[in-house]
Image (cartoon, rainbow, N blue to C red):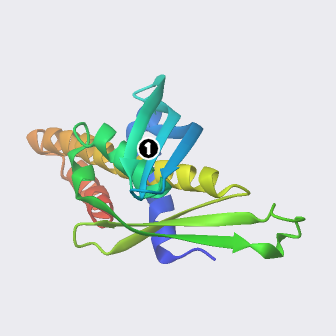
Amino acid sequence: MKTPEESKRNDLRDLFQSILRDNVISLSPVSVSAKEVFDNKESEVSFAFNERISGKSKKVNLRAVKGKGLVDCLFRGCKNKYSESYPSLQSVELVDFKVMPIFSMKKPGSRAETDIVLCVKVGDRGVSEFVSRSDSIIRSAFATTLKAFQFYMNCEASFDRIKIVLDDAAKRNRGDIQQRCLSDLSKITEMI
């Protein structure tokens, strides 16, 4: 069952597609390696993912990101990588994550699939949850983190594009376009 928040995000993904077209941002996992140091309770994670922005694809490698656990390292690495280009990410905070094994899937032994729920907060908007399912906790955590950053980066890119169209519509006295832009902006600002 989808939550109202998931439905809104799906509607926004459709909006991203209509506004950004070929410039929709996509982040897809490639590899992740984690190292735990038990003496100082610190984790170190290196990870790689494919990034597609403005029709250009490249592999991004983040090395030796330090934090308090795998998810914290993944989140910190992505936030540090993208916050300068997408300033709204500075207000995105990791507040929790949940590991939810799905034992009813009838897979033998430890092959049960797992949902990782990443809980993030944006300013005073409350907590948003992003979910990914896999038979690997690490894979799910990585995919979920990328999913969250991809969503908020597309929000900001769409917002910026709509503002350009809105300003142009105002100069041309196109109230119909202005109204549509304002409606689209309100949908985005509801989530960020």
Residue 128 left/right relative to 26: left
Residue 147 versus residue 24 in the image, above or below: below
Residue type beneath disc 1: Ser
Kindly tell me whether residue 176 is visible in this rendering.
no
For label 1, the SS is helix
Q: What residue do we see at 44% from left, 51% from top?
A: 43
Q: Position of residue 78 (x, y in %)?
A: 38, 44
State the image quarter where residue 120 is shown: bottom left
44, 110: nearer the viewer:
44
Q: Nearer the viewer, residue 71 or 39?
A: 39
Q: Residue at x 22, y 73 (%)?
A: 124
**Residue 7 against residue 85 in the figure, above or below:** below
Q: Position of residue 58 (x, y in %)?
A: 48, 23
Q: Nearer the viewer, residue 41 or 172?
A: 41
- Going 41% across and 50% down the picture, which residue do you hit? 73
Q: Is residue 102 left or right of residue 98?
A: right
> Where is residue 128 shown, x and y percent of the image?
41, 69
Residue at 56% over, 40% down: 33
In the rendered image, the residue lying farthest to the front is 39
Is 106 left, or right, of 67 in this rendering? right
Q: Nearer the viewer, residue 63 or 85?
A: 63
Residue of label 1? 18
